[in-house]
Image: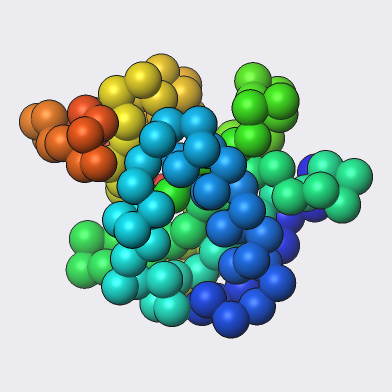
Amino acid sequence: MKIKTAFGNNNPVYEDAMKIRTAVFIQEQGIDAKIEQDENENRCLYYVGYVNEQPVTTARTLQTEDGVLVQRVCTLKNFRHQGLSSQLFAAIETTAKTKGEKQVWLFAQDQAQPFYLHNGFRVTGGQVMEAGISHHKMIKAV
């Protein structure tokens, strides 16, 4: 898998990320398109993983006082359970380490917690509802 990154929401990497997010969050999970995008779209670093030049997995990161916040993590249905998101997280963690960050953190959908636990995250917060879906805060030291 080839991983590309770009900052902000005015570039081809962002456009590819949005194709994946639309397919997963809006079409598959039924999240309202009006809330899937937010005020941070132009403040994030986007990661997109490509298989045979096709964008298949994505995440975005936002620099915070608590470390690197990872958001909008998703993979197209036909490409799940192949280790692609784990590769994406390895790239995110490498970038965080390079910038001197001590941790990455996120709010994981409860159904995705096993993936994050497998990748070294730990649950650190109580349940939070976002878009009608249960999430928990998870953190990983880098």
Q: Is residue 139 above or below residue 2?
A: above
Q: How many numbered marks, from 0 up?
A: 0
Q: Is residue 127 above or below residue 55?
A: above
Image quadrant occupied by the N terminus: top right
User: Residue placed at 43% from the left, 32% from the top?
Assistant: 29
Q: Is residue 18 above or below residue 78?
A: below
User: Residue placed at 41% from the left, 18% from the top?
Assistant: 114
User: Residue placed at 9% from the left, 31% from the top?
Assistant: 126
Instruction: Tell me which corner region of the image, top left, top right, bottom left or bottom right, holds residue 123.
Output: top left
User: Residue placed at 62% from the left, 73% from the top?
Assistant: 6
Colour scheme in use:
rainbow
State the residue in front, 12 or 4. 12
The single residue placed furthest to the right in the displayed view is 52
* Residue 129 x/y as whole percent: 16, 36
11 sits to left or right of 72 = right
* Residue 103 x/y as whole percent: 33, 52
- Residue 45 visible within the image: yes
* Residue 60 x/y as whole percent: 48, 58
State the residue in front, 63 or 129. 129
- Residue 117 visible within the image: no
Instruction: Tell me which corner region of the image, top left, top right, bottom left or bottom right, holds residue 120.
Output: top left
* Residue 131 x/y as whole percent: 25, 41
